Amino acid sequence: MDRQFLYDFDETATIRFVSFFADEGRFDLAIVKSDHFFGKRIVLDMQKNRFAIIGEDDLAEPGYLEDAFGLDAASAITLKQFLEEVI
């Protein structure tokens, strides 16, 4: 099989695992900080098996978290408030 790699490298990353409970439910997240995404973080929702690459600009985009994580508006607000503190 002929492969044409766009990139293939190892990198050390910082991963924060956080679980919190709010009125809208429980959030179990892994937040990956890497130089590969130009200051953005990979945010993984471990309950729903969904992830997104998120920066401050993405948090300001209406409907972004709802779409990326399949959240209702109230849950998205809770997640946004948390992510604004850590991103």
Image (cartoon, rainbow, N blue to C red):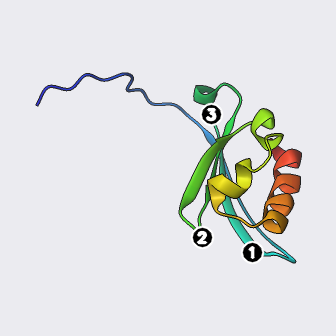
Secondary structure at numbered mark 3: loop
Q: Name the residue under label 3.
A: 34
Tell me if label 3 and label 2 are in contact, CB under 8 Å: no
Tell me which residue sits at (10%, 31%) in the image.
1
Q: In x, y percent, where is residue 26?
A: 75, 74
Residue 26 — which label?
Answer: 1
> In terms of depth relative to the viewer, which is nearer, 34 or 59?
59
> In terms of depth relative to the viewer, which is nearer, 44 or 75?
75
Q: Mark 2 points at which residue?
A: 47
Q: What residue type is labelled 1?
A: Arg
Relative horizontal placement of residue 60, taking residue 50 as reference (left or right): right
Relative horizontal placement of residue 69, taking residue 25 as reference (left or right): left
Q: Which amino acid does label 3 sit on?
A: Ser
Q: Which residue lies furthest to the front in this view?
A: 62
Secondary structure at numbered mark 1: strand
Q: In x, y percent, where is residue 31?
A: 67, 49
Question: Would you place residue 21 above or below residue 55 in this image?
Answer: below
Tell me if label 1 and label 2 are in contact, CB under 8 Å: yes
Question: Would you place residue 81 above or below residue 48 in this image?
Answer: above
Q: Residues within 10 Å of mark 2 (few under 14, many from 20)?
A: few
Tell me which residue sits at (58%, 52%) in the image.
51
| Disc 3 from disc 2: Cα separation | 22 Å
